[in-house]
């Protein structure tokens, strides 16, 4: 039985698991990322997770991490949410600490790999996936070319499509990105601007029926997301768009409203499916374990 370690590095937590060739999770371990304490602290936490999970049968490690990733060299070319992450050769650092062959990929790409392998995209050939969490990630899979990576490994950075020219500042350095409007941090920021109260996205969603300001903020999110998805359909013409990430946990409040607005705005809405991701918190670790298996086999 082939076993790999899958690591999903987020802005808040690092999730790790041992995965077999059927996508089953055999063992898990997680720690806080400690993103603001710098790269060395994050690497220390990664090493601790690997030491908890590894045994003599582990063949490789797959890692999903935020940012622009040179997946051939394993270098993070840019990342805005982990201090000291930009420019890091993450492949080299993890292999040095673990002694195990390691493969690095963008976190949204690994989530799509999981969904394509075992989840909501399993029977589709042309897929777009977005991950709505603290930020907004994106990935594109095409039957002819596989994952879209681009000339500079920055393809399918769907969170940084410009939604509002000259709009709100985004952590990537641009203004008006979709991430600045269609993400958990955007919902939180917009609510705070209007109330001076700092609440989590989940708390704001839960206030939808009781708080008029929360309702307006969530309705704005739904409105922006519907326009954004319409643009993605028009650019990529996928069979399906999968929506994952932590914000999907509150989808009972906004999903039906989103579908209504999307159908109203997208003139080809009947030609495409919108589906929630099947794997939520586990998508990253399963997808990371899968890329480790695939890329080890192809070497």
Image (cartoon, rainbow, N blue to C red):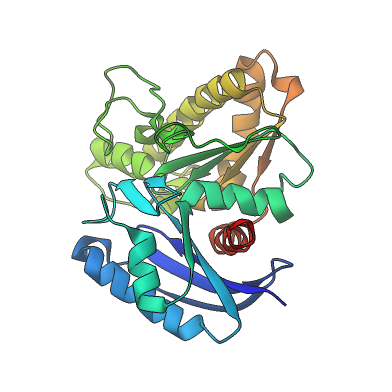
Q: Is residue 46 above or below residue 155?
A: below
Residue 9 in the image, given as x and y percentages of width and height: 41, 61
Q: Residue furthest right?
A: 123
Q: Residue at x 75, y 21 (%)?
A: 270
Q: Nearer the viewer, residue 277 or 249?
A: 277
Residue 25 in the image, given as x and y percentages of width and height: 64, 73
Q: Residue at x 46, y 85 (%)?
A: 52
Residue 247 seen in this snapshot: no
In the figure, residue 147 lies in which quadrant? top right
Q: Is residue 33 left or right of residue 50?
A: left
Q: Is residue 221 above or below residue 48?
A: above
Q: Residue furthest top?
A: 267
Q: Is residue 39 above or below residue 155?
A: below
Q: Residue at x 56, y 25 (%)?
A: 232
In the figure, residue 152 lies in which quadrant? top left
Quadrant containing the C terminus is bottom right
Residue 14 seen in this snapshot: yes
Q: Is residue 146 left or right of residue 31?
A: right
Residue 243 in the image, given as x and y percentages of width and height: 59, 42
Quadrant containing the N terminus is bottom right
């Amino acid at each position: 039985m082939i076993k790999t370690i899958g690591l999903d590095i987020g802005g808040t937590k690092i999730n790790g698991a041992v995965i077999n060739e059927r996508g089953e999770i055999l063992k898990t371990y997680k720690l806080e990322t400690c993103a603001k304490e710098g790269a060395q602290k994050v690497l220390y936490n990664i090493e601790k997770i690997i030491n908890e999970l590894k045994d003599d049968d582990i063949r490789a490690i797959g890692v999903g991490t935020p940012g622009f990733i040179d997946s051939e060299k394993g270098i993070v070319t840019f990342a805005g949410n982990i201090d000291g992450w930009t420019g890091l050769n993450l492949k080299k650092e993890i292999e040095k600490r673990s002694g195990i062959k390691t493969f690095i990929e963008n976190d949204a790409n690994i989530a799509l790999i999981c969904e394509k392998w075992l989840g909501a995209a399993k029977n589709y050939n042309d897929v777009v996936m977005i991950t709505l969490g603290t930020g907004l990630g994106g990935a594109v899979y095409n039957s002819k070319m596989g994952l879209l990576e681009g000339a500079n490994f920055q393809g399918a950075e769907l969170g940084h499509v410009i939604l509002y020219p000259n709009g709100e500042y985004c952590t990537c350095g641009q203004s008006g990105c979709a991430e600045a409007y269609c993400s958990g941090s955007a919902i939180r920021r917009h609510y705070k601007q209007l109330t001076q109260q700092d609440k989590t996205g989940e708390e704001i969603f839960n206030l939808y029926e009781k708080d008029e300001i929360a309702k307006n903020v969530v309705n704005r999110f739904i409105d922006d997301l519907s326009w954004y998805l319409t643009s993605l359909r028009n650019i990529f013409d996928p069979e399906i768009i999968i929506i994952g990430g932590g914000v999907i946990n509150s989808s009972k409040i906004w999903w039906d409203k989103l579908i209504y607005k999307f159908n109203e705005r997208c003139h080809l809405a009947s030609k495409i499916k919108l589906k929630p991701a099947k794997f939520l918190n586990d998508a990253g670790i399963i997808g990371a374990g899968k890329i480790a298996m695939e890329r080890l086999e192809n070497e």
